[in-house]
């Protein structure tokens, strides 16, 4: 006859890994797509800071599914939004940077192992290290420092017409799903 307490404890012990796996699967599914165009949330999205009356620092951080080109487009779009919401027409990029952050994921955790063999030519001990295969996980964060102005855009290649930028990039924006 089986003990009911033992079977309940055993079921709980077996259920724990399934709960952890389900939670990890949900977390991975949530970040499976590229970062949407959104305010900074959980380290992903855009942020900006006014430094002076017409000077701003703008950033956009993507996840590993967001290509560098998308990060840079979303950053330009945010700069254009700031320009128009402050009542200006164009922005001048005075400083820019893109930083890749590389992390590596392994298909198998590193592990030490040993063994004893009894073969046709004798016996022996062995010791080794399994390192698995590392896959790069690259995430890009880009920054701009901009000056915003009213009037016609100058011919400087670092000057952008805010409305033209929004018209060109806006249709390609991936917005967050509405809940």
Image: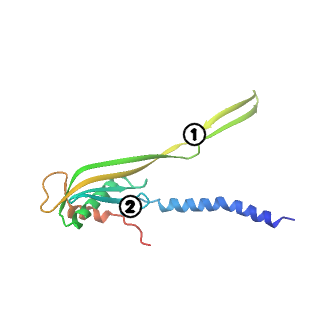
Position in image of residue 114 (x %, y %)? 69, 36
Position in image of residue 18 (x %, y %)? 64, 61
Q: Which of 169 and 48 is in front in this view?
A: 48
Q: Any mark on residue 164, and which?
A: none
The correct choice, above or below, for 8 with respect to 130 in the image is: below
Q: Is residue 70 in view?
A: no
Image quadrant where residue 3 sits = bottom right
Q: Residues within 10 Å of mark 1 (few under 14, many from 20)?
A: few
Closer to viewer: mark 2 or mark 1: 2
Q: Which of 68 and 103 is in front in this view?
A: 103
Residue at the spot of label 2: 40
The quarter of the picture where the C terminus appears is bottom left
Position in image of residue 151 (x %, y %)? 12, 62
Q: Is residue 132 in view?
A: yes
The correct choice, above or below, for 128 with respect to 102 in the image is: above
Q: Which of 28 and 144 is in front in this view?
A: 144
Left or right, residue 155 beside residue 126: left
Position in image of residue 148 (x %, y %)? 19, 59
Residue placed at 31% from the left, 59% from the top? 48
Residue placed at 75% from the left, 62% from the top? 9
Instruction: Farthest residue to the bottom: give it.
Output: 179
Local SS, label 2: loop
Residue at the spot of label 1: 131
- Using the numbered discs, state the Cα–Cα distance from disc 2 to disc 1 in whole angstroms: 35 Å
Left or right, residue 129 beside residue 32: right
Count of numbered labels shown in the rendering: 2
Instruction: Farthest residue to the top: give it.
Output: 121
Image quadrant where residue 116 sits = top right
Image quadrant where residue 42 sits = bottom left
């Amino acid at each position: 006859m089986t003990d009911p307490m033992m079977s309940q404890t055993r079921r709980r012990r077996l259920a724990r890994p399934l709960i952890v796996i389900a939670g990890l699967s949900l977390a991975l599914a949530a970040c499976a797509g590229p970062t949407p165009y959104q305010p900074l949330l959980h380290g992903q999205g855009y942020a900006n800071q006014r430094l002076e009356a017409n000077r701003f620092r703008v950033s956009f951080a993507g996840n590993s599914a967001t290509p560098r080109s998308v990060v840079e487009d979303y950053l330009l779009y945010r700069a254009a939004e700031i320009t128009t919401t402050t009542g200006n027409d164009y922005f001048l990029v005075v400083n820019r940077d893109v930083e890749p952050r590389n992390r590596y994921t392994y298909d198998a955790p590193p592990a030490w192992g040993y063994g004893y063999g009894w073969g046709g030519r004798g016996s022996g001990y062995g010791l080794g290290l399994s390192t698995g295969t590392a896959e790069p996980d690259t995430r890009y964060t880009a920054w701009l420092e901009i000056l915003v102005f009213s009037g016609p855009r100058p011919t400087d290649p670092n000057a952008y017409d805010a409305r033209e930028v929004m018209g060109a990039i806006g249709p390609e924006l991936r917005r967050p799903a509405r809940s």
